[in-house]
Amino acid sequence: MSSNVEVNEEPITVLPIKYSQSMHPNLHLHQFQLLGKALVMPPEAQEAGKSIKARYKPKTGHYEIHVPNDVRPARWNSEKGLNYGAARFEQDREEATIHDIKFKSKDPNETRLSETRLTSERVEHRREYVVGVVRDGTHKQHQSAYSA
């Protein structure tokens, strides 16, 4: 068995590790679909003052991240945008009915899809999840609020 690591290598630095559950009720870990690129704001959305937003829906227990779409004519099909927007409208209306939430009624034919919505789903946890941050020369680890 060969290894590229030398046995007698000196460590670059040594960091003390502090484990804490102090953030337990407020720390939530999310994993969304794997993206081939980072979530970036389209230039048109930045110029219009839009931003990437996140929200929590207490009745459904879901978290959502809303990313504005790039609606420049060279990158966006307006007809498909209206079709997808109408489908999103119907999906939102059904969800509101299921969870007994007030729903703002709009004309679904005039609803265009202006943002991509990443929605969380609860999954069964089988391990403990920990997030680590290096701050002030110390590696601080916090346990996730949803560990099993």
Image: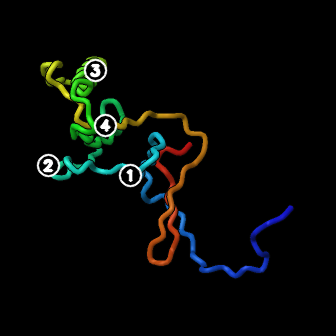
98 to the left or right of 128: left
The dot on residue 26 is: 1
Three-letter residue code for mark 2: Ala
Earlier residue among tags 3 and 4:
3
- Using residue 129 as the reference point, say whether residue 77 is left or right of it: left
The quarter of the picture where the C terminus appears is top right
Q: Is residue 96 visible?
A: no
Vertical arrangement, residue 14 with respect to residue 108, above or below = below
Give SS at disc 4: strand
Q: Position of residue 41 (x, y in %)?
A: 28, 50
| Residue underneath mark 3 | 87
Q: CA distance from mark 2 to mark 3?
A: 25 Å
From the image, state whether disc 2 or disc 1 is nearer to you: 2
Query: Hey, which quadrant is residue 57 in on the image?
Result: top left
Residue drawn at (22%, 40%), measured in percent from left and top? 72
Cα distance between the residues tagged 3 and 4: 13 Å
What kind of element bears circle 2? loop
Read off the residue under disc 2: 48
Q: Which residue is mark 4?
A: 116
Q: Is residue 84 left or right of residue 104?
A: right
Which circle's residue, 1 or 3, is located before the other in the chain?
A: 1
x and y percent of residue 144 in the render? 49, 50
Quadrant (top left/top right/bottom left/bottom right) for the N terminus = bottom right
Q: CA distance from mark 2 to mark 1?
A: 32 Å
C-alpha distance separating marks 4 and 2: 17 Å
As shown in the figure, which amino acid type bears the numbered disc 4?
Thr
Instruction: Check if mark 3's residue and mark 4's residue have beta carbons within 8 Å.
Output: no
